[in-house]
Image (spheres, rainbow, N blue to C red):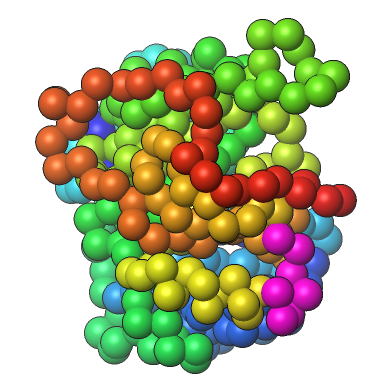
Amino acid sequence: MSVRSLAYIRLQATDLDAWRRFGETVLGTQTVASDDPDVLLLRIDSRPWRFRIEKGAADKVLAVGLEYPDAAQFEAGIAGLRAAGVTVTPGSAAETRLRHVQAFACCTDPSGNPLELCWGNTVAGTPFVSPLGVPGFVTGEMGMGHAVMPAMAYEATRAFYKELLGFGDSDEMRVHFPGGPEQGLGMCFMHASGPRHHTVAIGELPSPSGLIHVMLEVPSLDDVGLALDRALAAGVHISATLGRHTNDRMVSFYMRSPGGFDIEYGCGGTQYPDWSVVTPTITIKEDLWGHKWDFGQ
């Protein structure tokens, strides 16, 4: 009953045009035609969309979509949540069609993060074409990337993902900063059943948007460098310079999205086809090099 990957992100945004420009001129996502002028769909692979952004009065996350590999594991996962006393609301037929999945259900984790659990791999039937010539994003069975969420109820939230959604520990760290608590703030990186180093991470960090960052992976270092050039030319805030992480070995930089959270744009993340031979680690130093942070406003 284990989640396999990150399926999609649903957002509410005050400015859809800002997201469209950001997607088309910085990220290299493909805008998908929508019948609803208050909905923006962004595509990065064979799926009909991976970002669904809905017009609203505030910038916030509406749902982080997590995908099970099949119906049996989805149903077992939902049953396990209900047995544990978690309120789970099934999606309607119309809502399911909008998400291009076979079935989905909504719940929240102990820190209040909104989740949509789903199964069903629907493809668009037409090739992904980036307006910037990005050759593609690294997705497939690893999903669209990873999502890092705030978790002020840290231990309960960590247990929720591990015990009820089938995630496993990849690594953890304590974040120390001037004026912060002596013990630091907890950060936990958890893998799904797919080979990506982490699909979900949680941190004892507040985030008004409801997300800390979302990671997108591209095939090469040149793709990362070109995106960094585009972000700088567009005046996008660079939250972290180019660097390489200690845990997943990804080379990436971080930029501020129109939604107020960061997008990590990287390449070369380590894959783990067999999690049974991987020992979770405690990371003392987050980066091998680089990633100089500027959190800005």
Q: Is residue 131 above or below residue 205?
A: below
Question: Residue placed at 33% from the left, 35% from the top?
Answer: 191
**Rendered location of residue 98, percent (x, y):** 45, 68
106 inside magenta stretch: no
Question: Residue placed at 61% from the left, 84% from the top?
Answer: 25
Question: Residue placed at 40% from the left, 25% from the top?
Answer: 171
Of residue 87 and residue 291, the one placed in the foreground of this image is 291
- Residue farthest to the top, as pictured: 182
Q: Is residue 113 above or below residue 269?
A: above
Give the quarter of the figure containing the N terminus: top left
**Rendered location of residue 14, percent (x, y):** 79, 67
Of residue 140 and residue 122, the one placed in the foreground of this image is 140
Which image quarter: residue 227?
bottom right
Total residue callouts: 0
Q: Is residue 266 left or right of residue 148?
A: left
Q: Is residue 242 left or right of residue 57?
A: left
Q: Can residue 103 be seen in this snapshot? A: no
**Rendered location of residue 213, percent (x, y):** 59, 49
- Residue farthest to the front, as pictured: 289
User: What residue span does the magenta drawing correspond to?
Assistant: 232-238
Q: Is residue 121 left or right of residue 265?
A: left
**Rendered location of residue 74, percent (x, y):** 26, 40
Q: Is residue 285 above or below residue 8?
A: above
Q: Is residue 82 left or right of residue 24?
A: left
Question: Residue placed at 47% from the left, 40% from the top?
Answer: 288
Of residue 187 and residue 182, the one placed in the foreground of this image is 182
Q: Can residue 225 be seen in this snapshot? A: yes
